[in-house]
Image (cartoon, helix red, strand yellow):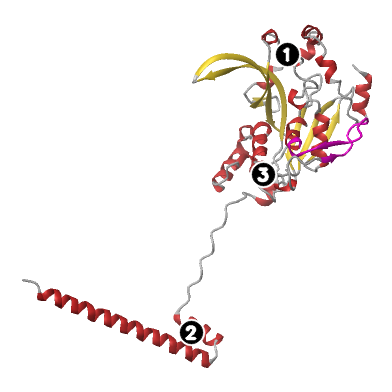
Amino acid sequence: MNKDKGKAKATGEPYKVPSYKNVVGKTPEQLRKEALKATPKENKLRDDAYAIAVSSNMTNEFVYPYLPISTIWIAPIELKYAHLAANEAAKFYLQEFADPFLYPKDYNFYYAILDSTGSVEFDYVNRTGGEWAYSKAFFKKVITPQQWNGDLYRFRELPKYRKEQNKFWFNYFDYIKAWDGAFCYENRQRKHSWFFQFRDFDQSSPLPQWFLMWFNNWGFHPITLPDKIRTIYDDFIKTNASLKTPGLMFAILYQVPWIMKWDVIISKMPLRKFGEIVHNIPYLGRRILIKWWDKFDFFAENSVFSQKGLINLEPLPPPPSPKKDITEILRELLASSSKSDLKAQLKEILQESDSDTEDTDMASLKSDLMQDSQDSYDV
């Protein structure tokens, strides 16, 4: 293990990412030999952790497993690497476990964006050797395109996040990428996990569409809820029938945490042309897995649910206007008008009434004359 790398992690300073040119300059055969040097412990796949079942231990407490909810497809891989285990093949395409489309920036860059904008509050727990065992991310706000104030390509200066850095800049599209790139960290044992939670989240502006896509990939899903809380969730949906993203709003309003981890998989992606499959390409993907945090007491005395109960976001119907009788209307009219004004108003009303009566009588007379003229031609 690189001692300098471990030292930098232990002191809380991000280490320098190896040069991209050094990686690209190596031949595929050299990269493959380096990948095969990995220890059996590093290469072991923990499939038992991904079982889709809930088992019970000796204390009759539920053990909540990681459930795969989505896959983020990264890049197609060459056939000569397709026979390797996914974590071995990933070494040829991922540097520091980040996506190739994020280069030459690393997850420290994207972490700094979310941290400096006040969007996410981070906390890390170190393991022996300086690597992160697990991390915490508390979501505070999401900057919308309207809040960026102007051109989305307009750059802002990023506060110093590396020792050797002088100045760095980011625009709104870097900010969007940060919500993926900041969570690409993985330790060498491939056991790193994230604690996610919306805490004091700013809901003053509607969430942008790209964030809804992000939550669909990385976010909480009701499939992980215990039975008692799932009942509350179902009631929440019924009460707020117009919500298009009930899972997201449930997580925000009740500050529901979830545990997330990811691994890499290889799957064949069918290429279709005119509805027919013309080829199957092996594709490298990042599989997102989440689980319920069993230490979270949804019904605790200080919990949101205990304080607010079932939250109703539906707009309340307008209250019916009280009906007034003629006596009350006349009293209000007398109280708000002088005698002279009241006489003038009554005179005007009576004149309109007489005019309406005359018009009605005239219309009735014309109708009778017309009827008589028609009767005279009847045989």
Q: What is the C-alpha distance between the residues marked 2 and 3?
A: 52 Å
Judged from this view, the residue extending furthest toward the left is: 379
Instruction: Check disc 1 and report its element: helix, strand or loop.
Output: helix
Residue topped by disc 1: 89
Magenta stretch: includes residue 165? yes
Amino acid of disc 1: Ala
Q: Residues within 10 Å of mark 2 (few under 14, many from 20)?
A: few
Please, is residue 215 above or below residue 43 in the view? below
Residue on which disc 2 sits = 330
Image marks 1 and 2: residues in contact by CB distance under 8 Å? no
In the rendered image, is residue 200 in sight? no
Q: Which residue is mark 3?
A: 207
Q: Do the CB atoms of the residues marked 2 and 3 lie less than 8 Å apart?
A: no
Q: Earlier in the sequence, mark 2 or mark 3?
A: 3
What stretch of residues is rendered in magenta? 156-174
Task: Determine the residue positioned at 23% across, 79% down.
Answer: 366
- Kindly give the residue lying farthest to the bottom in the view shown: 340
* Crowd tier of the residue under label 1, counting other residues whose Cα lies within 10 Å: few below 14, some 14–19, many 20 or above: many
Q: Position of residue 252 (x, y in %)?
A: 68, 43
Q: Quadrant of the C terminus?
A: bottom left
Front-lying residue, 26 or 266: 26
Q: Residue at x 35, y 86 (%)?
A: 354
Q: CA distance from mark 1 to mark 2?
A: 87 Å
**Of helix, strand and loop, which one carries label 3?**
loop
